[in-house]
Amino acid sequence: MSFLTESVARRMALTSRIVWVQAPRQFSTSIAARKTMTESAKDTIKTVDRKVSDKLVDGINLGAKAAESVTGKATEANYKAAGSAQEIRGKMKANSEELAGRAKGAAKEAEGTIKETEGAIKGAAKDAEGKAKSAL
């Protein structure tokens, strides 16, 4: 064997994944490296796998952002609800105090009316007593 063919044969024996093909150039002795069909398919599958996994990661990130947004809005709604509850409690307390004041006023007014009525009854009783004594 000549030196060139022997070195080419050694190179081909050492590299099992790459098929060496003579370049289609007339005035060159370089050898072009080409991949087999299975290696090309593996590379294509790796590329597709990588793109799919990148999209899945993007989807997971979007899901996490959506969950974070929902959690934030729920927390905000809880704070608003708590604020509304406090506001409603304050209004109810003010209304109950107002109604208690009105009830006290009505009670005082009724008490005054009762005293007036008692006074009128006592006066009428004294008048009746005076009339009864004078009639006797």
Image: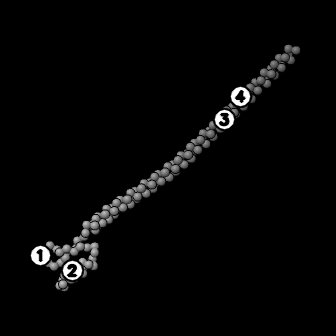
- The answer to whether marks 3 and 4 mark residues whose Cβ atoms lie closer than 8 Å is no
Name the residue beneath numbered marker 1. 26
- Dot label at residue 134: none
- State how far apart marks 2 and 3 are (Cα): 113 Å
Q: Amino acid at mark 1?
A: Gln
Q: Earlier in the sequence, mark 3 or mark 4?
A: 3
- The quadrant where residue 126 appears: top right
Q: Amino acid at mark 2?
A: Val
**Depth check, front residue: 119 or 36:** 36
Looking at the image, the residue that sits furthest to the front is 1
Q: Secondary structure at mark 1?
A: loop
In this image, 77 relative to 57: left or right? Answer: right
Q: Earlier in the sequence, mark 2 or mark 4?
A: 2
Residue density around tag 4, few if under 14, some if 14–19, many if 20 or more, within 10 Å: few
Q: Quadrant of the C terminus?
A: top right
Name the residue beneath numbered marker 2. 8
Q: Earlier in the sequence, mark 3 or mark 1?
A: 1
Name the residue beneath numbered marker 3. 103
Would you place residue 75 above or below residue 104 in this image?
below
Q: Secondary structure at mark 4?
A: helix
Q: Quadrant of the N terminus?
A: bottom left
- State how far apart marks 3 and 4 are (Cα): 15 Å
Give coordinates of residue 19: x percent, y percent: 23, 73
- State how far apart marks 1 and 4 are (Cα): 131 Å
Give coordinates of residue 52: x percent, y percent: 34, 60
Looking at the image, the residue that sits furthest to the left is 26
- The quadrant where residue 3 appears: bottom left
Would you place residue 74 above or below residue 12 in this image?
above
For image coordinates 31% across by 62% down, the residue present is 48
In this image, 46 relative to 29: left or right? Answer: right
- Dot label at residue 113: 4
